[in-house]
Image: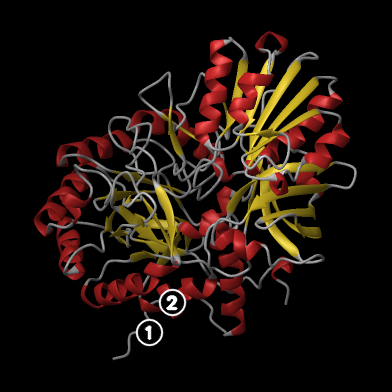
């Protein structure tokens, strides 16, 4: 059951020019978190900006009862959030949404992240590793400075391959190019991806072409975050008569379910 | 004194909205609370003054294509387009859930024609657990129905009358602020036999995405809600209260008890919270607690002592 509570901030660090890692204690939420779910966070204590912001769960420490969010400053809300300090409280609701479907057995998994879209894949990697899955991670960014999850993914024990546009680390070019060059489709049981939609669309095509189960994690503007306002609508591939809601039916969807913006 | 310890019984915050009896005056506005299920983990839904359920139509509606919402200064725009499962699904699935949870329910209906409004009122009649009917005659986001009814006094009169003929429940049209003279619309509602007025629906607006150079919302226009609209709502309720004797459910940008007090003081008999729920699902409870505290601190025994007090002779 999701809850609303005040999370005590225990660390809040800028990890590069525009990305931050925020860790807070919220035991009731942490106990329930599934990979791929999100936290609806109020950026400030005042009424402006008004709405909460949905942020991916980056990591969870169930013993400590803490949740870590990785976010990029994109507007007024996230900019305001950067001013929260250690020992202050954040107003959080969660965990919300439907997360990644975890395999029933030990599988060979591929995680493809683009930019800050790596966030939900890190906690996913942690849980997949606990289940004994083999995990390969591809992370595409502009430059090596955005490869912020490298250390966590190494500790978890994933096979990690970066792709940077400027070639400052790993493969030089798009992560989708790295995907087609590096990955043997027959060596995979399942793919998970989160990042810009054109990137996810290529990953989804790759998975569909090779008949590999795959899920995408989507982002939409949201108001309520719980399925009440019907704001975050997405068209279904399979059914013209209804829209799914990213906050409640997602944010994770099977690639067979939703249309991606290319 | 701490609210948690309970208040002296002498403070009365029950209210009567044209025959809709409310234990407290703080309601959840239509379209912001679904059919109640989504907020069950966060708030005791039976304690909300009334839950005005999502606008419901005769047939199911898929709603508008995305993007449907965008935050704006001190508010947000929405163009959901009345996505809903239709009146039968409401009566068969959602109403029983609300009834079991002892929720005070106000249905909200929207039609394409006067006949559709009347038909829905007739379908609701006889179902236990509906305290009243709010008429959505002011949705700015659908092409047919909605706003076209709410901006024409003659149409308002006719739709209210048609619904009144088919139901024994109190009927409360929700007025649009997108009119030149709100008092004229309120008078037409009264003439049609309305038991109360709900004020106000969202203000029609738009936003542009400067990157794509296109309107942000797929529907181009959307309804503005949130604190940005509060002064407009207060002004309109103030005007209507002076001219029309119907009780008013007042709302528009309420996010705390001070906002709620302003609405009561300009003449609202009860208040509705909408966008504020998205930020704080427990907001209705908080407003009620703070309202009680305010009344105790100021030696006010009943809500009636607050309603309309901002009107100086």
Using the image as rendered, state which of residue B284 and residue B106 is in the foreground: B284
**Count of residue discs:** 2
Using the image as rendered, state which of residue B14 and residue B243 is in the foreground: B243
- Asked if badges 2 and 1 are on one and the same chain, I answer yes
* Quadrant in which the C terminus of chain A is drawn: top left
The image position of residue B118, as x and y in percent, is 20, 39
Q: Which residue is mark 2?
A: B262
Q: Which residue is mark 1?
A: B310
Q: Are marks 2 and 1 in contact (CB under 8 Å)?
A: yes
The image position of residue B169, as x and y in percent, is 31, 47
Looking at the image, the residue that sits furthest to the right is A63
* Label 1 crowd bin: few (<14), some (14–19), many (20+), radius 10 Å: some
Residue that appears at 71% across and 55% down: A16
Marked residue nearer the N-terminal end (2 or 1): 2
Image quadrant of residue B233?
bottom left
Using the image as rendered, state which of residue B76 and residue B167 is in the foreground: B76
Which chain's residue wears label 1?
B
Residue that appears at 56% across and 33% down: A250
Q: Is residue B183 above or below residue A198?
A: below
Q: Is residue A58 above or below residue B260?
A: above
Q: Is residue A159 above or below residue B202?
A: above
């Amino acid at each position: 059951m999701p809850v609303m509570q005040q999370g005590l901030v225990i660390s809040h660090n800028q990890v590069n020019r525009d990305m931050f890692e925020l860790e807070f204690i919220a035991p009731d939420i942490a106990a329930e978190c599934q990979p791929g779910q999100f936290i609806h966070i109020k950026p400030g204590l005042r009424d402006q900006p008004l709405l909460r912001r949905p942020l991916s769960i980056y990591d969870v420490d169930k013993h400590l009862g803490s949740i870590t969010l990785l976010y990029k400053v994109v507007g007024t809300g996230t900019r305001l959030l950067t001013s929260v300090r250690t020992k202050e409280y954040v107003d959080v609701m969660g965990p919300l949404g439907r997360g990644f479907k975890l395999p029933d057995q030990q599988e060979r998994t591929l995680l493809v992240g683009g930019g800050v879209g790596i966030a939900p894949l890190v906690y996913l990697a942690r849980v997949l590793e606990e289940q004994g899955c083999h995990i390969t991670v591809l992370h595409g960014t502009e430059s090596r400075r955005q490869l912020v999850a490298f250390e966590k993914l190494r500790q978890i024990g994933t096979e990690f391959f970066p792709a940077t546009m400027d070639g400052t680390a790993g493969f030089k070019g798009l992560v989708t190019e790295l995907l087609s060059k590096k990955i043997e489709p027959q060596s995979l049981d399942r793919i998970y991806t989160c990042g810009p939609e054109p990137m996810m669309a290529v990953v989804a095509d790759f998975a569909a072409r090779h008949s590999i189960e795959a899920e995408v994690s989507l982002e939409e503007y949201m108001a309520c975050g719980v399925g009440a306002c019907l704001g975050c609508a997405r068209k279904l591939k399979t059914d013209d008569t209804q829209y799914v809601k990213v906050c409640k039916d997602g944010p994770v969807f099977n690639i067979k379910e939703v249309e991606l913006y290319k | 004194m701490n609210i948690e310890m309970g208040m002296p019984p002498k403070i009365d915050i029950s209210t009567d909205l044209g025959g809709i009896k409310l234990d407290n005056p703080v309601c959840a506005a239509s379209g912001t609370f679904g059919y109640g299920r989504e907020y069950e983990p966060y708030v005791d839904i039976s304690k909300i003054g009334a839950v005005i359920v999502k606008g419901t139509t005769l047939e199911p509606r898929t709603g508008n294509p995305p993007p449907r919402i965008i935050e704006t200064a001190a508010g947000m725009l929405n163009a959901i387009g009345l996505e809903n499962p239709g009146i039968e699904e409401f009566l068969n699935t959602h109403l029983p859930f609300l009834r079991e949870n002892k929720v005070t329910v106000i249905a909200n209906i929207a039609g394409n024609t006067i006949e559709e409004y009347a038909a829905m009122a007739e379908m609701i009649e006889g179902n236990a657990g509906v305290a009243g009917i709010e008429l959505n005659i002011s949705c700015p986001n659908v092409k047919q129905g909605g706003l076209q009814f709410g901006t024409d006094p003659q149409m308002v009169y006719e739709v209210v009358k048609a619904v009144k003929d088919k139901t024994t429940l109190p009927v409360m049209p929700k007025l649009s602020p997108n009119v030149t003279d709100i008092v004229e619309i309120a008078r037409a509602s009264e003439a049609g036999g309305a038991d109360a007025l709900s004020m106000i629906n969202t203000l029609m607006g738009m936003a542009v995405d400067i990157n794509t150079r296109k309107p942000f919302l797929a529907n181009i226009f959307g309804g503005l809600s949130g604190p940005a609209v509060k002064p407009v709502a207060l002004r309109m309720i103030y005007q209507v209260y002076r001219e029309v004797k119907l009780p008013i459910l007042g709302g528009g940008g309420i996010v705390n008890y001070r906002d709620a007090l302003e609405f009561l003081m300009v003449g609202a008999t009860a208040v509705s919270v909408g966008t504020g729920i998205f930020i704080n699902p427990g907001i209705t409870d908080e407003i009620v607690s703070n309202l009680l505290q305010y009344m105790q601190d100021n030696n006010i025994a009943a809500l009636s002592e607050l309603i309309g007090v901002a009107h100086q002779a």
